[in-house]
Every structure is written in C-alpha cells, then in structure tokens.
Image (spheres, coloured by chain):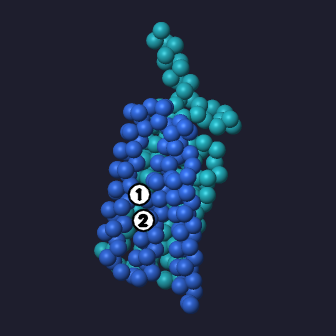
Chain colours: A blue, B cyan
Amino acid sequence: MSFVEVLDVIAMAMLAVAGVLGVWRVVREGSVADKLLGADLLTVIVVGGVAVGAGVTSSPLFLDVIVLVAALGFLAAVTVARYIEKRGARFAGDDWT
Amino acid sequence: MNELGAIITVIGAGFSLISAIGLHRFPDVFARMHAAGKASTLGLGLILLGVAIRIGDDGEFAKLALAGMSAVIAVPAGVHLIGRAAHRAGTETSAETVVDELSDARRLRAAAEE
C-alpha cells in the first residue's frame, strides 16, 4: 500500500469510529435534544465520508450527493428543534428516551 | 499534491472523531452543543479542502466549496437552534454550570412585567 492509501484507510477508520459513537448517542443515551445533536453530527460525518470516498476514487459523481446531504441535514435539525420547542419540557427530559 | 490532500483529509477526520468523543464526554446538552457544532464543522471543512486539493478540477472545486459554505453556515445554526429549543423546553443544566444568562434575563423580564 502506498502512503496515500494508508492515509485514506486511517481517515475512513476515524470517520467510522465517529459514526459508531454518533449512532450510540442517538440510539442508547440521553434526552431528545442529545439524540438530535447526535443525528446532526451523523449527517456531518456522512458528508465527510462521502467526500473522502470521492477523493479515494477521484470520481466527481459523489460531489452532488455531498451538496444535497449538507443542505438536508440543516432542514432535519430545524424541523426536530421546532418539534422539541413546541412539545415542551415533558418530551425533552430524561424520562422520554 | 495527492499526499498533501490526504494528510489534510486525515486531520479533518480526526476533528470529526474528536467531535464525536466530545458528544459523549461533556456533561449536558449545552456543553455538547459546542462539540457537535464547532469541531465537526472544522473537520468537515478540512476534509472538503483535502478532497478539493486531490481532485484539482475547477468544476468539482466549485461544488466542494458550495458544500463547505453551506455546512459552515448551516451546521452551527442548526446546533444553536437545538440548544435554544432544549433551553426553552426546560432541559436541566449540569451541576458545574456557572452562568445561565438566558434564564436570568427571562426571570428579570417576568419580574418586570408583574
């Protein structure tokens, strides 16, 4: 393996560990706001992973996906944040997990 | 140029990993906001910069710049919205919290209206 290939594997492995930590936060622990932060981080990690994939294969096909997912993540965060704000503390405490 | 781009990409992936670790290590939602909003934005920016250096084509560079700009604007704004919603919904702060100016301001305003 060349130097660049090793670096690609390292970058992908770091993103994979970060993704597992994010999924763990969404599935297992915390209030709704915590889970939403985890989901927001997951979209950023997915965008990063697709970007690294585009760099590895040097294929421009993935770049449209990057732009779209980056925009969609913001919409998702806004929607669920509005939901938490309207439903109130009852749904944001630790008892509703 | 390939090596430089790969090194920058690895640094960006490291920032994303640090952000995910911070999401578990920090004590409450309002501290985790900082991990999820800042470190991950920097990490994504570095990853996109590294990939742009590696691909090195003008049209693709424009797309990566667009994705990077929208991420720099949207991710911190979205995380801030989440934090504001959590505060309005009455999420408790951790015991180590020193200052909560939004609660203080709301209390002062309620007292002034009475």
Inspect this view and state whether residue B49 appears: no
Note whether B77 is above or below B109 in the view shown: below
User: Tag on residue A20?
Assistant: none
Image coordinates for residue A29, horizontal then vertical, percent: 57, 49
Inspect this view and state whether residue A34 appears: yes
Image coordinates for residue A95, horizontal then vertical, percent: 55, 37
Q: Chain of mark 1?
A: B
Q: Secondary structure at mark 1?
A: helix
Image coordinates for residue B37, horizontal then vertical, percent: 51, 51
Q: Secondary structure at mark 2?
A: helix
Identify the residue shown where x is 30% and y is 74%: B59
Local packing at callout 2 (Cα closer than 10 Å; few below 14, some 14-19, many 20+) is many
Asked whether the residues under the numbered discs 1 and 2 touch, taking CB atoms below 8 Å apart as contact, a structural biologist would say yes
Identify the residue shown where x is 47% and y is 36%: A91
Horizontal side of residue B69 vs B38, given as left or right: left
Identify the residue shown where x is 53% and y is 69%: A16
From the viewer's side, name the closer residue of B107 and A96: A96
Note whether B103 is above or below B16 in the view shown: above
Residue at label 1?
B71
The disc labelled 2 sits on which kind of residue? Val
Residue at the outermost bottom position: A1
The disc labelled 1 sits on which kind of residue? Ala
User: Tag on residue A47?
Assistant: 2
Q: Quadrant of the N terminus of chain A?
A: bottom right
Residue at the outermost top position: B114
From the viewer's side, name the closer residue of B55 and B113: B113
Q: Chain of mark 2?
A: A
Horizontal side of residue B51 vs B19, given as left or right: left
Measure the C-alpha gap from mark 1 to mark 2.
Answer: 10 Å
Identify the residue shown where x is 49% and y is 83%: B2
Local packing at callout 1 (Cα closer than 10 Å; few below 14, some 14-19, many 20+) is many
Image coordinates for residue B57, horizontal then vertical, percent: 35, 79
